[in-house]
């Protein structure tokens, strides 16, 4: 059977006669369009037609999943409590985002002498205060994404060091001359309260509660007395010392 080509179709002559001329024209135009597309993606015009017998054009599309950075988040749920005067150490951890990270305190406060490290998220120091603290910590990654988290922790009063009196001798006084000397203590918890617990002070001199011995002596001689100091801790400590030679 003899066939006639109409565009990219090969039809029997009897079928071609039955196809309207306008439809034949549309088929030819579609054939030319398809041939042009083949050349645009790497083929050679004319090689995309059915008579060429082959088409070497190819188009590659990468459909593999692309990595997506995890959402930035602070993963440390709580900060530990601590004790005044004892080293405090805590680490705030992060996940997701893109390193490096930068840490900051955006609200609230940390105890005195305790700080947040901007490059590591470590909170450390030796606190010198007590109380409850409510800091809010923020972390930012290298893509300027941020995450924050609020915390609450408590510092309890620690056991103060032992109380002691550091003054062991007093300067000599002169009869009728104004005199002043201050007793000193260490350890415990200030403020301190001082008193004379035994012995006798020279007439004209007195010891106040702050540890200041002052006045104008009106009596000469050698005097021996014992002083006592008490701190203001919840469980007070007391220290005593004898001043002067017996």
Image (cartoon, rainbow, N blue to C red):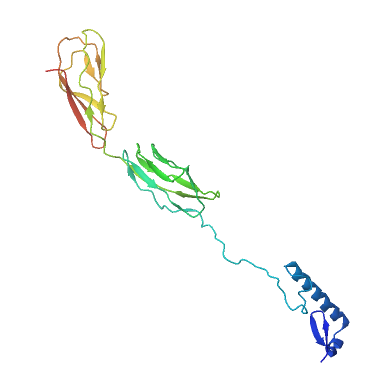
213 left or right of 57? left
120 left or right of 226? right
Residue 29 drawn above or below residue 110: below
- x and y percent of residue 85 in the render? 31, 38
> Can you tell which quarter of the image residue 193 is in?
top left
Q: Quadrant of the C terminus?
A: top left
Residue 11 drawn above or below residue 145: below
Q: Quadrant of the N terminus?
A: bottom right
Residue 216 drawn above or below residue 127: above
Nearest the camera: 50 or 138? 50
Residue found at x 25% / y 26%:
185
- x and y percent of residue 204 in the render? 21, 13
- x and y percent of residue 4 in the render? 84, 85
29 left or right of 143? right
Residue found at x 82% / y 83%:
5
Nearest the camera: 6 or 80? 6
Tally the numbered discs: 0
């Amino acid at each position: 059977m003899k066939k006639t080509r109409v565009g990219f179709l090969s039809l029997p002559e009897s079928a071609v006669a039955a196809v309207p001329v306008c439809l034949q024209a549309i088929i030819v135009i579609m054939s030319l369009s398809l041939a042009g597309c083949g050349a645009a993606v790497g083929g050679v015009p004319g090689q995309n037609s059915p008579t060429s017998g082959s088409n070497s054009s190819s188009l590659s599309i990468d459909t593999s999943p692309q990595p997506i950075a995890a959402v930035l988040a602070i993963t440390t749920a709580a900060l530990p409590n601590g004790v005044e005067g004892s080293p405090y150490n805590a680490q705030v951890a992060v996940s997701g985002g893109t390193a490096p990270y930068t840490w900051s305190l955006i609200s609230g406060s940390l105890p005195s002498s305790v700080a947040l490290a901007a490059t590591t998220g470590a909170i450390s120091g030796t606190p010198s205060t007590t109380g409850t603290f409510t800091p809010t910590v923020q972390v930012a990654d290298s893509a300027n994404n941020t995450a924050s988290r609020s915390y609450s922790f408590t510092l309890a009063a620690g056991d103060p060091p032992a109380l002691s009196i550091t003054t062991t001798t007093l300067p000599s006084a002169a009869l009728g001359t104004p005199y002043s000397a201050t007793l000193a203590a260490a350890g415990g918890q200030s403020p301190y309260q001082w008193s004379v617990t035994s012995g006798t002070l020279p007439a004209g001199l007195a010891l106040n509660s702050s540890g200041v011995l002052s006045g104008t002596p009106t009596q000469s001689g050698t005097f021996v007395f014992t002083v006592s100091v008490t701190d203001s801790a919840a469980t007070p400590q007391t220290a005593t010392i004898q001043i002067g030679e017996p």
